[in-house]
Image (tube, grey):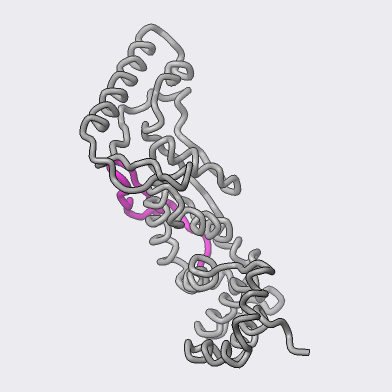
């Protein structure tokens, strides 16, 4: 089932290697007491949506994706903070690493209000030239160390974080959605967001019903604190909120659930 690679950054890619399950696998797991239990696409979509908004996550774990990824080391180190996946990365102990480095079109400025973020473009050709000079020198030293007989596992010490690496990454859909929620966020580093966009494109194509619910309730949804809920209670009436929700197309049990989120169950 290997798919075409989706190009990411200047030399990277994301490629689907294999996938186990689809929307039907989620439904089947949720209706295990009734065998397969599938009825119509509409009913399956309603069930998946119920599972998503109530955070019944185990049925989503029945779907798994395996990707082949090529990305710079600094992106991969962020990526591997998500510790729920099975990962196998190319080893610099066994292989001579390739002379491939990520070179951005432009640097970004350090954000003034976010110590770990960036903002805006820094148009500085000299800065880009310094990057290219550093990576060329680092790889020259790496090759020289190898020529002198230094072990590959130690020669790699001189290589910078913009070196490209490759890995296979297998993840269940529940934890994959968590990865995408964080890495599609505007607060995530731009480079890893580009990889998340490529993965999202693949996931959406294979589990469209689950993706629609993920977008609705998680990716573009929000969780309110107790204080925030109290503030809303003081600004809204159940009648006004019900009217607004109805105008947006909510009805029946979905409307009841939405009202209970803010005002609690009716006595």
Please give the count of numbered marks on the rendered protein. 0
Using the rendered view, name the quadrant where residue 72 is placed: top left
Q: Is residue 177 left or right of residue 195?
A: right
Image quadrant where one finds the C terminus: bottom right
From the viewer's perspective, is 80 left or right of 98? right
Q: Is residue 21 magenta?
A: yes
| 239 in relation to 58, above or below | below
> Where is residue 93 drawn, in percent x and y?
48, 23
Q: Is residue 150 above or below residue 207?
A: above
What range is drawn magenta here?
1-22
- Asked whether 160 or 27 is in front, the reply is 160
State the quadrant of the N terminus. Answer: bottom left
Q: Residue at x 48, y 51 (%)?
A: 66
Seen as rendered, the residue at the extreme right is 267
Foreground of the two, 108 or 74: 108
> Is 258 on the left-hand or right-hand side of 128?
right
Q: Is residue 73 above or below residue 147?
A: below
Where in the figure is residue 16, as x and y percent of width and height? 41, 53
Percent across and percent down for residue 53 are 60, 73
In percent of the image, x 33 and y 28: which residue is there? 98
48 vs 167: above or below = below
Query: Given the current orientation, which residue lies at the most extreme left position?
Result: 125
Q: Nearer the viewer, residue 80 or 25?
A: 80
Q: Is residue 24 magenta?
A: no
For the point 44% across and 18% down, the residue is 152
Q: Residue at x 38, y 61 (%)?
A: 201
């Amino acid at each position: 089932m290997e798919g075409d690679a989706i190009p990411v950054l200047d030399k990277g890619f994301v490629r689907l290697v294999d996938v186990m399950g689809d929307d039907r696998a989620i439904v089947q797991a949720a209706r295990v007491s009734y065998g397969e239990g599938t009825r119509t696409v509409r009913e399956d979509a309603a069930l998946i949506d119920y599972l998503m908004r109530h955070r019944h996550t185990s049925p989503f774990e029945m779907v798994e994706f395996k990707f082949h990824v090529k990305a710079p080391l600094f992106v991969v180190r962020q990526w591997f903070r998500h510790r729920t996946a099975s990962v196998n990365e190319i080893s610099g102990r066994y292989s001579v690493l390739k002379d491939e480095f990520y070179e951005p079109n432009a640097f970004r400025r350090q954000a003034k209000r976010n110590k770990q973020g960036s903002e805006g473009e820094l148009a500085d050709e000299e800065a880009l030239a310094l990057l290219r000079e550093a990576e060329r020198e680092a790889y020259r030293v790496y090759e020289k160390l190898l020529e002198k007989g230094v072990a590959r596992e130690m020669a790699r010490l001189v290589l910078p974080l913009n070196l490209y690496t490759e890995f296979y990454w297998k993840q269940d859909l529940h934890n994959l959605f968590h990865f995408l929620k964080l890495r599609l966020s505007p607060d995530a580093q731009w480079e890893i967001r580009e990889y998340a966009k490529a993965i999202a494109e693949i996931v959406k194509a294979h589990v469209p019903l689950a993706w629609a619910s993920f977008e609705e309730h998680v990716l573009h949804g929000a969780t309110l604190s107790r204080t925030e809920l109290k503030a809303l209670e003081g600004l809204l009436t159940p009648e006004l909120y019900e009217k607004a929700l109805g105008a947006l197309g909510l009805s029946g049990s979905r409307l009841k659930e939405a009202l209970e989120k803010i005002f609690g169950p009716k006595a």
